[in-house]
Amino acid sequence: MINIQEVLETNKMIEQENLDVRTITLGISLIDCIDSDLEVLKKNIYKKITNTAKDLVSTGQAIESQYGIPIVNKRISVTPIALVGGAACRTPEDFVELAKVLDQAAEKAGVNFLGGFSALVSKGMTKSDELLMHAIPRALAVTKRVCGSVNLGSSKTGIDMDAVKLMGEIIRQTAELTKEQDSLGCAKLVVFCNAPDDNPFMAGAFHGVTEADAVINVGVSGPGVVKTALSGVRGENFEVLCETIKKTAFKVTRVGQLVAQEASRRMGIPFGIIDLSLAPTPAVGDSVAEILEEIGLEYAGAPGTTAALALLNDQVKKGGVMASSYVGGLSGAFIPVSEDQGMIDAVQAGALTLEKLEAMTCVCSVGLDMIAIPGDTSPSTISGIIADEMAIGMVNQKTTAVRVIPVIGKTVGDMVEFGGLLGYAPVMPVNPYSCEAFVSRGGRIPAPIHSFKN
C-alpha cells in the first residue's frame, strides 16, 4: 500500500528536481460509436468522449491540490479512427471531419491533446486505412489538439513498405500544410513499429482494441530526479550506479501509482498502466542527455553513449516494475532532441548526429523523436529513415518510432522554435544519398525468423 510517508519523501524531488506526473491519459473506446452515417458517427463520438471525460481535468486538479504532485497534462486517447470511421468515411475529407469533431470534444473536455487519429497497417492497408492516412496532413493542419500515429510494422508481421513509402509523402505534405508554424503538424504525428495498445504519451497514444471501454493510464517522468541521485555516486562502480537508478525509478513510479489509483477511484474508471518514461522537457535540469553526462560522458553522442543509455533504460524498467503491478506503455528513456536541452547542446557541439541517434534507439524506449531536418528533404529519404527505424524495432522485438519534422524553408544549422513542452531544435543534416529505388519496390519486408514462435 502507498502511505503518506512515500508522498512526503517526494517533496524534494518535486520542488527541486523537476519530478512530475507528465500525464493522466484517459483511454476511451469508440467501437460502440460506429455507424454508417457520418453525421450520426460524429454525434456519437462527441457524446462518448465528452461524457466519459467530463471529470478528467477536475479530478487531476483535485489530486494535484491534495498531494502537491504536479500533473502537467490531462489527455485522451481513443480507438484508432481508421477502425471507427471505416463504415462511414468515403473520402479523406470525411476523416478530416472526424478529426474536427475529436478536436471539439478535446476542447470541451479541457485536455491539451487527444491521440488516436491513427491506423494500424503493419501487414497491409485497408481502404479505410489509406483514406485516413491521406487525411492526416489536412487533419493536423486544421486542428489544435489532435495527434496522429500509424503503426507500420511489427516483429510478428514484418514491415509494410507500401505504407512506409506513403508515410514519407504524408509527413512531407503535413510539413507543407503547417509551414507557417515551422511545420508544427509533424510534431503531432508519429510512426511506429510494435506500437503498444496502452501508451499514454503523445503523439503516439491510441486506445487499443484489446483495452476495456475506458481506462486510466498515467505517464510519470523524472530525469532531473535520476540525475540528482547519480550526482551523489560519482566515481562509484557500475553496481552502485545501477542500484541508484533502480531505487530512484522505484520512488518515481510510486508517485505515478498513487495518482493512477486516486484518479481511478474518483472517476470510477479502471486503472490501466503506469508508464515510467524518462521523458525530458526543455527545462534546465530535466534532461536525459544530462543523465548520460552524469554517468561519465562529455556529451551525449560520445563513444559509450549507447552502452550508457542501455544501462539507464534497463535499470529504469527494473525499478519501475517493482513499484507497480501494471507497468506498460513505453517505459524507459526517451531521447527527443527538441525537448531535451542536453541533446540540443550535444547537436550544436557536433557530438550528436542523426546516425548516432539511430544507434541509440536500439536500446532506448522509443526512437528518432522530435528531430528537425531540412525542409527540402525528399519524401523517399524520410521513408528510408522510417524503414531503418522500423527494422530496428522488428528485429529487436521492441517498440521504435519516428517523429521527424522537415521544416519548410529551413536548412542545416537553423534553429526552430516549437514552444511549450515541444521546445526548440537545430535543423540536423540527413544523408544526401538517395534510397528512392529501395522504397519504391512495393510490398512488405517479411518478419524475421524468430517471429515464428506459435
Image (cartoon, rainbow, N blue to C red):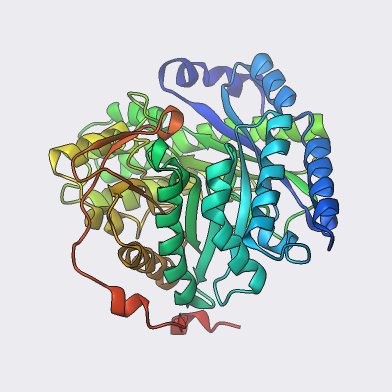
**Quadrant of the drawing holding the C terminus:** bottom right
Q: In which quarter of the image is residue 232?
A: top left
Give x and y (percent) for residue 310: 33, 53
The answer to whether 168 appears left or right of 250 in the picture is left
The answer to whether 200 appears left or right of 41 in the picture is left
Give x and y (percent) for residue 8: 57, 17
Q: Is residue 191 above or below residue 77?
A: below
| Residue 250 appears in the picture as rendered | yes
Q: Residue at x 43, y 53 (%)?
A: 366
Give x and y (percent) for residue 50: 79, 36
The answer to whether 355 appears left or right of 157 in the picture is left
**Quadrant of the drawing holding the N terminus:** top right
Q: Is residue 1 above or below residue 454?
A: above
> As rendered, which of 345 and 321 lies closer to the eye?
345
> As rendered, which of 279 and 437 lies closer to the eye?
437
Q: Which residue is drawn at 22% across and 45% down?
A: 411
Q: Quadrant of residue 71?
A: top right
Q: In which quarter of the image is residue 388?
A: bottom left
Give x and y (percent) for residue 397: 46, 68
